[in-house]
Amino acid sequence: GTREGALSFLDFWLNSIFLHTQTKQGRCAPILLIGTHKDKVSGAEEHQHISRMLSDRFGKSMALTAWRSVEMYEDATGGVPLCFFPVDNTIGQSDAAVRAALRVVEEVAKKSETIQQEVPLAWLGFYDRIREDKRLCVSLDDAKAMASECG
């Protein structure tokens, strides 16, 4: 597709993320933009151009709140932080940007209220047990029996 088509598609998804994850405070879920095919678009100047283009386009859009939730790639080649992680998916975690994106995901997850929420160990045991069950549906009686066994 065209550049405009790709940007319109991204605009749709940023707005969707905002609409479906916004909080009462007007924030939304953290967003990491991953640019694949760094093996074909590898120059730091090209990455900086793409980052500026994305920032210009989405920094003023309806997805502004979502855009503010975009995590930055601080250690980009060329020393200029990028609003996306340019990755070469042909080399996996050998790519520094892939490792950086994984680090950011871990950092963001650790700060998440959902991750910080304490859950009783018995509930985790029940959760594991219900996931291991191969049936499509479980009767209420069976679920109660499993829960009882887990404490």
Image (cartoon, rainbow, N blue to C red):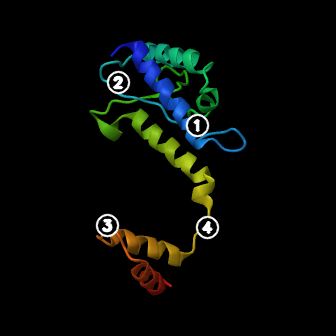
In three-dimensional space, the C-alpha distance between marks 2 and 4, rounded to whole angstroms, equals 40 Å
Circle 4 packing at 10 Å, graded few (<14), some (14-19), many (20+), is: few
- The relative height of residue 109 versus residue 28 in the rendered view (above or below) is below
The quadrant in which residue 125 appears is: bottom left
Disc number at residue 145?
none
Circle 3 packing at 10 Å, graded few (<14), some (14-19), many (20+), is: few
Q: Are marks 3 and 2 in contact (CB under 8 Å)?
A: no
| Residue wearing tag 1 | 19
Q: Amino acid at mark 4?
A: Glu
x then y, percent, for residue 135: 30, 70
Q: Earlier in the sequence, mark 4 or mark 1?
A: 1
Tell me what residue is drawn at x 35 percent, y 18 percent.
41
| Residue wearing tag 3 | 136
Q: Are marks 2 and 1 in contact (CB under 8 Å)?
A: no
Q: Are marks 2 and 4 in contact (CB under 8 Å)?
A: no
In three-dimensional space, the C-alpha distance between marks 3 and 1, rounded to whole angstroms, equals 31 Å
- Is residue 138 toward the left or the right of residue 116 in the image? left
Observer-side mark, 3 or 2, equals 3
- Is residue 74 toward the left or the right of residue 85 in the image? right
Q: Evaluate whether residue 73 shows in this view.
A: no
As helix, strand or loop, the secondary structure at mark 4 comes to loop
Q: Are marks 3 and 4 in contact (CB under 8 Å)?
A: no
| Residue wearing tag 2 | 38
Disc number at residue 118?
4
Q: Earlier in the sequence, mark 3 or mark 2?
A: 2
Observer-side mark, 2 or 4, equals 4
Q: Earlier in the sequence, mark 3 or mark 1?
A: 1
As helix, strand or loop, the secondary structure at mark 1 comes to helix
In three-dimensional space, the C-alpha distance between marks 2 and 1, rounded to whole angstroms, equals 30 Å
